[in-house]
Image: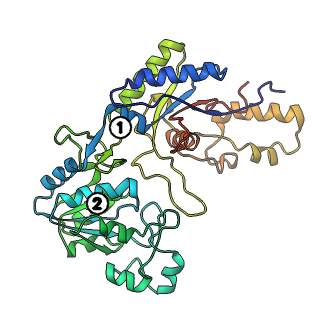
Amino acid sequence: MSKRKYGTVAVGVRAPIIKEGDDIISFVTDAVIEAAESGNLKLGDKDIVGITEAVVARAQGNYAKLDDIAADIKQKFPNGTMGVIHPILSRNRFALLLKAFARGVDKLYLMLSYPFDEVGNPLISQDKLDESGINPYKDTLSEKEFCKIFGDENPHLFTGVDYIKYYKSISPNIEIILSNDPSFILNYTKDVLCADIHTRRRTRKTLKNAGANIVLTMDDILSKPINKSGFNPDFGVLGSNMATDEKVKLFPRNGFETVNKIQQSLKQKTGKNIEVMIYGDGGFKDPVCGIWELADPVVSPGYTKGLEGSPSELKIKFLADNKFAEHSGEELEKNMKNAIKNKRSTPLNDMSKGGTTPRRYIDLIGSLCDLVSGSGEKGTPIVLIQGYFDDYATE
């Protein structure tokens, strides 16, 4: 029988509070080594270190003031009127950006999708929608019409915030409309900012085809610094979070350069080839409320080469119930391990591979990191994962 009695282990690493200007390379390296020593963990090749995007961005000082964002909006929407369509419903993710957008123009038409936003946050319940007879794929509503049909109070299930009222209160030059058809905004303005995250390219294409004038996405905003602000050439203000009432923290820059330097540092100090990734939101959906966690543009904005690819695994339970149904004990274990060792010869369409998840490693591991580290008070912005690439045949 195998001597090893455990598989993948994920450990949250406590670390000092990182501040702007701190050396992220030594910060992570030292924290991982100290945690391993404290927990009597032996670091090994193919271990994984995950670092939350927040500490990387904070060390970089990748912040922007709302006035910097407003200045960029003013440059990119010079006509003074803009539509902002299909944002998520969020206080820390979008409300400050909306405040900045509104400062940059004279008039802002905010078009919300309904009954849910892109990641599943509800403006109203599905039951209310069913009872109303409204068809969200066809019907468009003004704010007044929406409130007349669904009532003046529609608090969010978890936050208790009525997002229509909340977003409207941010600035007097905001007018809210509701439609799931991106081109409907062109009845109000031809200059549009697509505020959706994962569907933004398709939305932009739809608007261009429908005759829009200026069409930008949120990765176009602060793609370069304004007034010496932070910026992100890849994601703009996507992935940003509230820092203060007048400042947002942007998604970290130079992610791949950062993880490679951390990997080199760990190699120098431990002699081990440890994989490193930066992670943000995990890519999973809550089964109770239906809200999809991924409000960041990607799970990982930077990872080392050893984390590329997707798993291709055999289903142990399928083999145990079928091919090896007559086996037991040491014979079953031996045959199972041999099947795993020789799995490359198993065709992809073989049922023994049925049901395994063909997601990318970075999305799976980033989701694991997000769940382990949490986003509140745990104080573990770094996660050490061991044994992830091992399997039942690994001694």
Which circle's residue, 1 or 2, is located before the other in the chain? 2
Point 33% across, 32% down: residue: 60
From the viewer's side, name the closer residue of 5 and 391.
Answer: 5
Using the image, determine if residue 147 lies above or below residue 368: below
Q: Which of the 4 image quarters holds residue 332?
A: top right
Identity of the residue furthest to the left in this view = 79
Point 51% across, 28% down: residue: 15
Circle nearer the viewer, 1 or 2: 1
Q: Which of the 4 image quarters holds residue 141?
A: bottom left
Instruction: Locate residue 230 relative to residue 53 in the image: left or right.
Output: left
Identity of the residue furthest to the front in this view = 245
Quadrant position of the C terminus in the picture: top right
Q: Secondary structure at mark 2?
A: strand
Instruction: Locate residue 233 relative to residue 15 in the image: left or right.
Output: left
Question: Is any atom of residue 115 visible in this view?
Answer: yes
Q: Which of the 4 image quarters holds residue 127?
A: bottom right
Please rate how many residues cluster around mark 1, counting C-alpha atoms within 10 Å: few if below 14, some from 14 to 19, many from 20: many
Expressed as whole percent of the image width and height from the top left, the position of residue 185 reads 25, 71
Amino acid of disc 2: Cys
Query: Marks 1/2: CA distance?
Result: 21 Å
The residue that mark 1 highlights is 252
From the viewer's side, name the closer residue of 186 and 312.
Answer: 186
The residue that mark 2 highlights is 194
Amino acid of disc 1: Pro
Expressed as whole percent of the image width and height from the top left, the position of residue 358 reads 56, 46
